[in-house]
Amino acid sequence: MHPWVLLAALGAALPPAPGTPLDEASATTFRGPPGSFGHSVAQAGGGVLVGAPLDLGGRGRVFECRYGAGSCRDVPVTAPPDVAPVALGLSVAADGSQLLACSPKARRTCGELEELPGLCVLLPPGSALPAARPACPTPASDIVFLVDGSGSVTPGDFERMKDFVVHVLRRFQATDARFALVQFSTDSRLHFDFAAFERLTPAGREAEVRGVRQSKGTTQTASAIRTVLTEVFGPGRGSRAGASRILIVVTDGRKYGDPLEYRHVLPEAERAGVIRYAIGVGDAFRQPDAVAELHAIASAPPEDHVFRVDNFDALHGIQNQLQEKIFAIEGTQSALGSSFQLEMAQEGFSALLTPEGPVLGAVGAYDWSGGVFVYGPGGKPTFVNASRGAGDMSDAYLGYAAESLSLGGSRALALGAPRYGHVGRLLLFGLRHGPTDTWELLADAVGQQVGSYFGASLCALAPRGDGSAKALLVGAPMFYGDGSGGRVVVCGLPPEVGGAARPRPAPKRPQSRPKAAPDRPNPTRPQIDHPDPKSTNPTPNRPNSTPN
């Protein structure tokens, strides 16, 4: 290892240094709305920028307070029309006359889905970061209805089942969903595939469904599922690459006379990424064996993919539930099983104004592994996060805290990930100049106690004459022991990083929790704290426990 690369002297004490006492007698007091005024503060020219994220019913406000006047004024912030600010002022930053106010809980509605992309605004001139957002995704779904046409279904109930299919088609007219319809009994009949569905008008699709005649025969469900997998989701039927693949099976009883078992076909469905819903209709599904068969047909967990109704008239009562579950699939998954990327990024959870441009923490990016956006010249963003080789960062909340610093003439970013491995982690990135500037991981340090939230706050100390940082103060607000709660850890820094600097080998993510502090909520200030990024509370959380 190269000691000049690593974050050294974890827990070391700072050398004594002369200080200037604070002038408390002539201090200026600024007052604002009760509840959250002063949650975030940044020194701005002849005053301070103050956030009040709980004001206005949780929308939040930002104030500019001037020392000379001894008063504050409300800073108007205009959000883009498609984004609703929530907890504005949760984080603020200032550099001379340039001000930055952030609303990391800002929401955007995309169809039936609600995203939390976050929002920051530069003041002046009031320009938003990011300047432009991608259009709402139009997720594609290819959905097959596999309906029971066996002899146990009465003609009236078969008509009711077709009514159910028609009503579901209507509900999805405004989405990028394509449908296919297959009837099964002794054999399987394809009535229309995805390509035919696309060619037909809405009225034509309904006419196709209405015109289906019941097959009668035995209930060969497993064989019908194989037909769907090999023929309907196969090439030449209009199934789209990247679309969610969904199968809805509607049946009135257990399979009968089928040469195949579910164990022969369902692994194929799993490998193909087909999400399966099973709808059981009638008294047959009061029997445990019949219920077990529905569970076998459906994807796991069964409580999300199995529906049971007493009769075919009751099918209409599950349309909303089915629609909501499919919309949820469209919002978070593809056929390859991908999940959240930047939909829940919560940009602006931490905020800096640096020589490289604004730096915005995005703790919710990529399933809450997190990272930061650095907005360079022209507002072009660069996303900085830990690569796979730097350890498992799942749910780490990287970017919860950020600090900009100089090390021997090189620029660096320190980022906190307080949920890493339940103990927290500090990562130091250096800026490497080239045809395309890149941020490289130079060093890191890992917390020592479970639930301590090591990395929740950061502060660089730069006593060197060249402005180069000598140490980083790392907050671990939930650390407990030695008769007190919370701890500030001193991480020493080498005089230079960059050049030949090589990253430290990735630390092993803890596999189990040692016996230490419980993994508590994340209070970092005595009155009001950043919310847990996954919390459904739109406003910041107050601490609900006190460190021992």
Image (cartoon, helix red, strand yellow):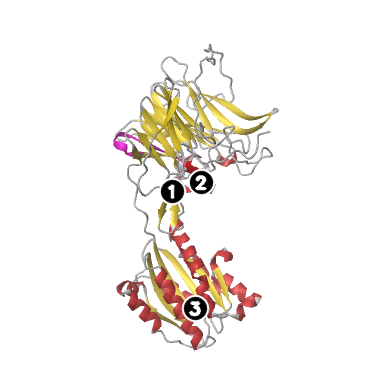
In this rendering, is residue 169 above or below 487?
Answer: below
Q: Nearer the viewer, residue 264 or 481?
A: 481
* First along the sequence among labels 1 and 3: 1
Is residue 414 visible in the rendered structure shown here? no
Task: Residue under label 1, please give it.
Answer: 107
* Mark 3 or mark 2, earlier in chain: 3
Q: Which mark is residue 538?
A: 2
Counting from the top left corner in percent of width and height, residue 318 is at: 52, 71
Q: Which residues are magenta?
A: 368-381
State the separation of the CA atoms marked 1 and 3: 46 Å
Q: Is residue 245 above or below residue 181?
A: above
Q: Secondary structure at mark 2?
A: loop
Residues at badges 1 and 2 in contact (C-beta under 8 Å)? yes
- Alpha-carbon distance for marks 1 and 2? 9 Å
Q: Is residue 26 magenta?
A: no
Q: Quadrant of residue 442?
A: top left
In the figure, is residue 439 to the left or right of 492? left
Question: Is the C terminus in the top left, top right, bottom left or bottom right quadrant?
Answer: top right
- Which is more foreground, mark 3 or mark 2? 2
- In the image, 291 versus 68, the foreground residue is 68
* Looking at the image, residue 151 lies above or below residue 470: below
Where is mark 3, residue-wise? 223
Q: Position of residue 380 (x, y in %)?
A: 32, 39
